[in-house]
């Protein structure tokens, strides 16, 4: 009989232990759920650490007057790390008159080309394209043809320049005289029936 009573006590103890563990599990899950779904205004208030000169935003952004001017003593520096490429200039007084030695039109960045100048110096398509390329080279245009790169890399000023791959970017750097000269050379090329190439 002792054996049967021991089993009843053991069975009862296991049931009681299981019930107690179940109650503890339910309480833990309930506590976690409460913490998870608790709204901030129901919990303990937290105090924000804001500077004394902090000003709150408007309650609604559409109430702001967007036309008002707000002054600030702060400054912003918009300068890029790299300077914009500048075309070298010939200045005989500075002793660099030979900077573009070998160019068909060494002063095409400062002097507007005439029809007479074109007829005198441009005898074929290659010469016409070279005259156009000279203007682009002054700004470090990265030519797509190796022969153009090889030619202009013989000039130290070109070889040392940071190169620009986008032709439109280089066009935007041209002076009015340079833009006029490129257009005049391209028109001359078209009139002769030569195709343009880079």
Image (tube, helix red, strand yellow):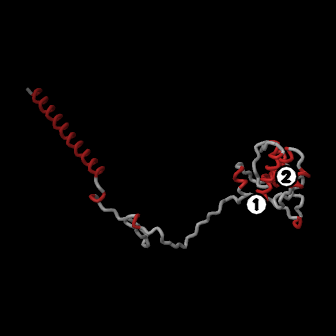
Where is residue 49? Give x, y as percent: 40, 66
Secondary structure at numbered mark 1: helix
Disc 2, SS: loop
| Front-lying residue, 49 or 39 | 39
Who's the residue at 62% across and 63% down the image? 78
| Residue 84 visible at all | yes
Query: Which of label 1 and label 2 is nearer to you?
Result: 1
Left or right, 165 with respect to 155, comes to left
Counting from the top left corner in percent of width and height, residue 159 is at: 80, 51
Give the labeled residue for mark 1.
176
Q: Which mark is residue 155?
A: 2
- Quarter assignment of residue 108: bottom right
Quick one: quadrant of the C terminus?
A: top right
For this view, does 6 lie left or right of residue 118?
Answer: left
Along the line of sight, the residue nearer the viewer: 154 or 19: 154
Q: 96 above or below 52?
A: above
Name which of mark 1 and mark 2 comes first in the sequence: 2
Q: Tell me what residue is drawn at x 26 percent, y 44 percent.
A: 29
């Amino acid at each position: 009989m002792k054996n049967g009573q021991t089993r009843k006590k053991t069975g009862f103890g296991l049931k009681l232990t299981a019930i107690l563990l179940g109650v503890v599990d339910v309480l833990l899950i309930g506590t976690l759920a409460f913490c998870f779904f608790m709204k901030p205004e129901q919990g303990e208030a937290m105090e924000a650490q804001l500077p004394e000169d902090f000003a709150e935003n408007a309650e609604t952004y559409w109430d702001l007057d967007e036309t008002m001017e707000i002054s600030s003593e702060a400054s912003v520096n918009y300068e890029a790390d790299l300077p914009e490429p500048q075309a070298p200039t010939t200045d005989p007084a500075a002793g660099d008159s030979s900077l573009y030695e070998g160019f068909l039109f060494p002063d095409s960045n400062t002097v507007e080309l005439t029809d007479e100048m074109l007829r005198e110096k441009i005898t074929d398509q290659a010469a016409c394209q070279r005259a156009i390329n000279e203007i682009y080279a002054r700004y470090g245009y990265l030519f797509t043809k190796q022969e153009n790169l090889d030619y202009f890399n013989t000039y130290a000023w070109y070889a040392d320049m940071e190169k620009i791959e986008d032709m439109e970017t280089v066009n935007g750097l041209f002076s009015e005289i340079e833009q006029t000269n490129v257009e005049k050379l391209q028109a001359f090329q078209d009139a002769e029936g030569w195709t343009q190439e880079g």
